[in-house]
Image (spheres, rainbow, N blue to C red):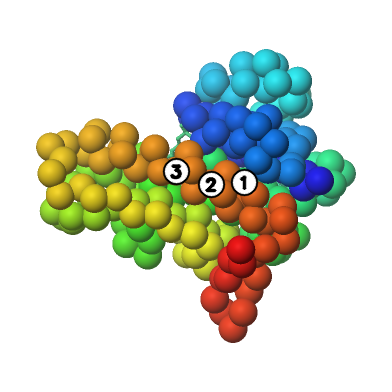
């Protein structure tokens, strides 16, 4: 069974979508740890409600918090197979990327490689998409490397936004597909059906 660590900074709706898919028997995985840099976010309640250990990250050395320098050893101690960034806003430290090469995935609320990079998170993304007058947006799940939103793309799903009136409307449409595409990718990884072939990520049926 795939051992997951899910990182969240905010609302946690993608985390809930993952937990629902596991409960439904759709994904053969277990969430070992929820990790957050935002003690006030919903992650704490979700962790409690599901009996999952929640860890808080801090850049300073505060008791009860995990320092970014301890993150890699914590994840190794927990025998984590896959790190899932589900709305996690901070950059993953390089040593963690090195230790977990091709074992960290992120969900991005647009069709990469457009509308990604530093500062492109949350509503900033949807505002940029709206202002560009793009007619299609979507969600991307990609491997995480040392550059923001730059890792190889695993899966994408698009949504028609020709008739939207606001960035909020785009956000709603995209979130809907995020909740499908992220569990889908985790399921495929759990089934060993995601491969790298000549620099392309292949998902087999
Ligand atoms: C999602 O749109 C995700 O793509 C982005 O941040 C948002 C997180 O939403 N990275 P939630 O916390 O999962 O509800």
132 to the left or right of 87: left
Residue occupying the point 12% across, 37% down: 165
* Circle 2: element type: helix
Q: Does residue 89 lie above or below 108 as drawn?
A: above
Between residue 203 and residue 42, name the one nearer to us. 203
SS under mark 3:
helix
Q: Do the residues labelled 2 and 3 touch (CB within 8 Å)?
A: yes
**Can residue 117 be seen here?**
no
Q: Mark 1 points at which residue?
A: 84
In the picture of the structure, the residue carrying the numbered disc 2 is: 182
Q: In this view, does 105 lie to the left or right of 73?
A: left
The residue where tag 3 is placed is: 178
Tell me the mark number nearer the camera, choosing from 2 and 1. Answer: 2
Query: Residue 167: x and y, percent?
Result: 22, 38
Location of residue 58 in the rendering, given as x and y in whole percent from the top left corner: 64, 33
Give how far across and how far down residue 3 sits, in percent. 77, 44
- Answer with left or right where residue 40 lies relative to residue 130: right
The residue positioned 22% from the left and 43% from the top of the image is 127
Point 61% across, 63% down: residue: 205
Between the residue at mark 1 and the residue at mark 3, the CA separation in whole angstroms equals 13 Å
C-beta proximity under 8 Å, tags 2 and 1: yes
Query: Is mark 1 in CB contact (under 8 Å) with mark 3?
Result: no
């Amino acid at each position: 069974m795939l051992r997951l660590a899910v990182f969240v900074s905010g609302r946690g709706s993608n985390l809930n979508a993952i937990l629902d898919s596991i409960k439904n028997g759709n994904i053969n995985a277990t969430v070992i740890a929820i990790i957050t840099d935002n003690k006030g976010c919903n992650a704490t309640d979700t962790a409690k409600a599901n009996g999952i250990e929640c860890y808080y990250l801090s850049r300073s050395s505060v008791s009860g918090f995990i320092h970014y320098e301890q993150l890699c050893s914590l994840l190794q101690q927990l025998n984590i197979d896959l790190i899932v960034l589900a709305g996690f806003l901070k950059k993953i430290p390089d040593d963690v990327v090195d230790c977990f090469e091709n074992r960290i995935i992120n969900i991005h609320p647009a069709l990469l490689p457009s509308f990604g990079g530093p500062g492109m998170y949350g509503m900033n993304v949807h505002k940029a998409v709206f202002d560009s007058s793009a007619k299609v947006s979507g969600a991307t799940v990609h491997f995480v490397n040392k550059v923001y939103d730059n890792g190889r793309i695993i899966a994408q799903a698009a949504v028609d936004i020709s008739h939207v009136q606001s960035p909020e409307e785009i956000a709603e449409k995209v979130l809907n597909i995020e909740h499908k595409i992220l569990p889908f990718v985790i399921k495929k990884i759990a089934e060993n059906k995601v491969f790298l072939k000549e620099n392309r990520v292949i998902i087999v049926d």
